[in-house]
Amino acid sequence: MPTFPALRRLDRRGWRSGVRFAKVWQRLLGVERTVVEGVIFDEDAGAIIASVRPSKGATRRCGLCGRRCPWEDRGEARRRWRALDLGAIPAYLEADAPRVRCVEHGVIVAQVPWARHRARHTTAFEDQCAWLAAHCSRSAVEELLRIAWRTVGAIVTRVVADAHARHDPLEGLVRIGIDEVAYKKGHRYLIVVVDHDSGRLVWAAPGRDKKTLNLFFDALGKSGCARLREVSADGAEWIADVVHSRCLNARLVMDAFHVVQWATDALDEVRRDVWNAARREYGDKVLADRLKGCRYALWKNPEHLTKRQRGKLAWVAYTNARLYRSYLLKEELRLAIRLKGEEGIRLLAHWLNWASHCRIGAFVELARKIRRHRQPIEDALRSGTSNALVESTNTKIRVLTRVAFGFRSPDALIAMAMLAVGGCCPELPGRQTQLRLELGAAA
Ligand SMILES: [Zn+2]
């Protein structure tokens, strides 16, 4: 396989690129501040190999901080970076990997303008990969780019770190929501922090304890903590403790999304009890099966019910007063949360009175729980924060925990979430130029 020092003798097999062709190749490969020295087709690898070097202003820079440094040595050998396919053919960049001596980072491989530090793929390739990971299925990404899902995880992590280095997601936060999300079949947890104003995920880390949450407030800094006005959470005491000790100007409110979740859980408990009773005590298999089939009808919001599910609900109302009463209790609580403001608070008071006297164990217990958290729930209703945005972000993160299965580390899962709901998804490479061409063609 020919390597590039030999390229200069390659006129017989290929052509040495003139200045004009070098420019075309620069565009084709999606690189900037880069000199394309020559291009060959490597028969063995079945790939196009372009020999490149950084242009004058882009040499001798530290791989981490980009500072100009003195040369250290020539490095180990020439290296290859996978570039975007050219048509249907894979393409690689090949170049020396010399080292420099940075005052801060010591002896380090010099920065190259076509790829991120430590990457084996060009920046254009990585950006395209990240964009695809945010928009397509796992198998589509793997097949189209011919890379393993684990590599996608590493790439996405680098792309997101790069985006965060350019724009700090923790800047200017005023109202945030803190939540825990289970992943790895519920064995592990992430703490996620969402910006209520933009609906974006701004921070996440593996764990569900005070120590991990404190890391977020450390990252936010003293002035950032002081700027916070409202923090919503699910009522967990460890979150409340940390918020009270770190955010002196913020009000802690209840995440209304979780209140509805509690009611849904209570309803499910009642349904299970009724089902078990039908099965065991009366041995009524038909009734038990019909009850089992009602789960979605009871669980879904009534405005989304299908005709069939509405029929099931009517059947429950007719045959099982206790279960139907539980359903109505769930729905009234959900309505109070949706109404918000003083109206919502009045309905919540009515609900508490009803639930406390309903003689259905799960809901009496729920009423107690809600009384314990009444102040933060009322604060949430009063503040009128739109939970829909945060709720959809949370739902998307929960979906992602399944998609990102197969990544080795939670970092890759977090990076995936940052791409999808954190506003870190890069543009597809080279799109601006293409748009101009198309507009030109239309005119
Ligand atoms: Zn440096």
Image (cartoon, rainbow, N blue to C red):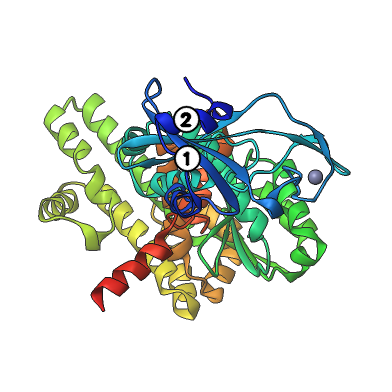
Residue 404, position as x, y percentages in the image: 45, 36
Vertical position of residue 297 compared to residue 347: above or below: above
Vertical position of residue 247 compared to residue 396: above or below: below
Q: Would you say 214 lies left or right of 236 here?
A: right
Residue placed farthest to the right in the image?
103
Q: Would you say 184 lies left or right of 191 here?
A: left
Q: Which mark is residue 326?
A: none
Which residue is pictured at 45% across the width and 52% down the height? Answer: 420
Q: Nearer the viewer, residue 316 or 28?
A: 28
Disc 1 secondary structure class: loop
Instruction: Count neighbours of disc 1 (C-alpha within 10 A) and say few if under 14, some if 14 to 19, many if 20 or more.
Output: some
- Callout 2 amino acid: Leu
Residue 324, position as x, y percentages in the image: 25, 52
Instruction: Count neighbours of disc 2 (C-alpha within 10 A) and say few if under 14, some if 14 to 19, many if 20 or more.
Output: some
Which residue is pictured at 36% across the width and 57% down the height? Answer: 330
**Residue 40 appears in view:** yes
Q: Which mark is residue 10?
A: 2
Q: Quarter of the image containing the C terminus?
A: bottom left
How many callouts does the rendering have?
A: 2
Q: Would you say 204 lies left or right of 317 here?
A: right
**Which residue is disc 1 drawn over?**
16
Residue 347, position as x, y percentages in the image: 43, 72
- Callout 1 amino acid: Arg
Which residue is pictured at 45% across the width and 28% down the height? Answer: 406
